[in-house]
Image: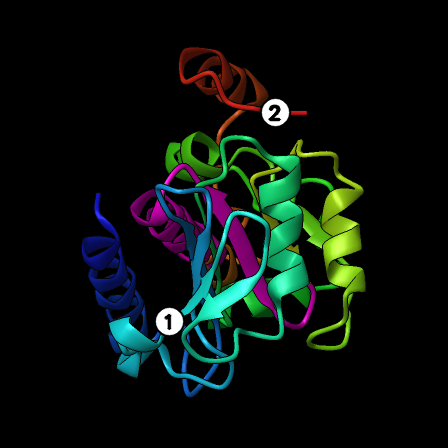
Amino acid sequence: MNENALREQICLLAKSLFDRGLTGGSTGNISSRTSDGGLLVSPTGTSFGRLDPARLSRFDADGNLIGGDKPTKEMPLHAAFYDTRSTAGAVVHLHSCHSVALSMMPDADADNFLPPLTPYAIMKLGKVKLLPFFMPGDPAMGEAVRGLAGKRSAVMLANHGPVVAGKDVEAACNAIEELEDTARLAMLTRGLEPRALTTEQVGKLVTKFDVDWE
């Protein structure tokens, strides 16, 4: 995909997330690798509903800002995924309501944040790591991701929001939507003892779809 088309795709997908209430106001950030090894990144303080393709922050392959507006303050978080996961072609971070709500529950599983309610989150995300609360923009978030040594494609920042890396921007957006949908199901069925997938069923999914389940 050429760079102009990628810029348009980033803005189109971001607006779709915004229009459906998956992140509001000027929250959330998104980035994608370019064909020359650089990055396109949503600028700081911008709304997913009103991103301008021409004003996306542009980094070269050495990490130097070479065009566009000032990037999101969460660049250390994005960089941590790119530096530790060779398959990462895009990173998306949202402030989606149900996943944040689930992160605040006292029994939230830090190692495997999403309960196995449907096959799709397992297939698209693997295990999601719940990280503790950090101040927005704190570089320690990036260090926490680096500490996972590339073993997770998705993390949940407690009281803040999910972050997902994918092979490209469309895959990352699809995966983070699946994360939020599963969190919504978990909150809707909370206290109702829903029939989750069994350990055997999860194992078959992991094997069939070659899911990273460490």
Quadrant in the picture for the C terminus = top right
Quadrant in the picture for the N terminus = top left
- What's the residue at 47%, 33% (across, down)? 122
Q: Position of residue 188 (x, y in %)?
A: 45, 62
Is 186 colored magenta in this rendering? Answer: no
Mark sitting earlier along the chain (2/1)? 1
Q: Nearer the viewer, residue 83 or 103?
A: 83
User: Is 196 situated above or below 137?
Assistant: above
- Which element type, helix, strand or loop, lies under badge 1? loop
Q: Position of residue 91 (x, y in %)?
A: 48, 52
Q: Position of residue 136 (x, y in %)?
A: 69, 77
Front: mark 2 or 1: 1
Horizontal side, residue 107 vs residue 45: left or right: right
From which residue to which does the magenta span run? 158-183
User: Is 50 situated above or below 93?
Assistant: below
Is 166 colored magenta in this rendering? Answer: yes
Q: Nearer the viewer, residue 70 or 126?
A: 70
Under mark 1, the amino acid is Leu
Label disc, if present, on residue 56 of the rendered structure: 1
Label disc, if present, on residue 213 of the rendered structure: 2
Answer whether residue 81 is visible to the viewer in this image.
yes
Answer whether residue 20 is visible to the viewer in this image.
no
User: Is 2 situated above or below 42?
Assistant: above
- What's the residue at 51%, 81% (across, down)? 44
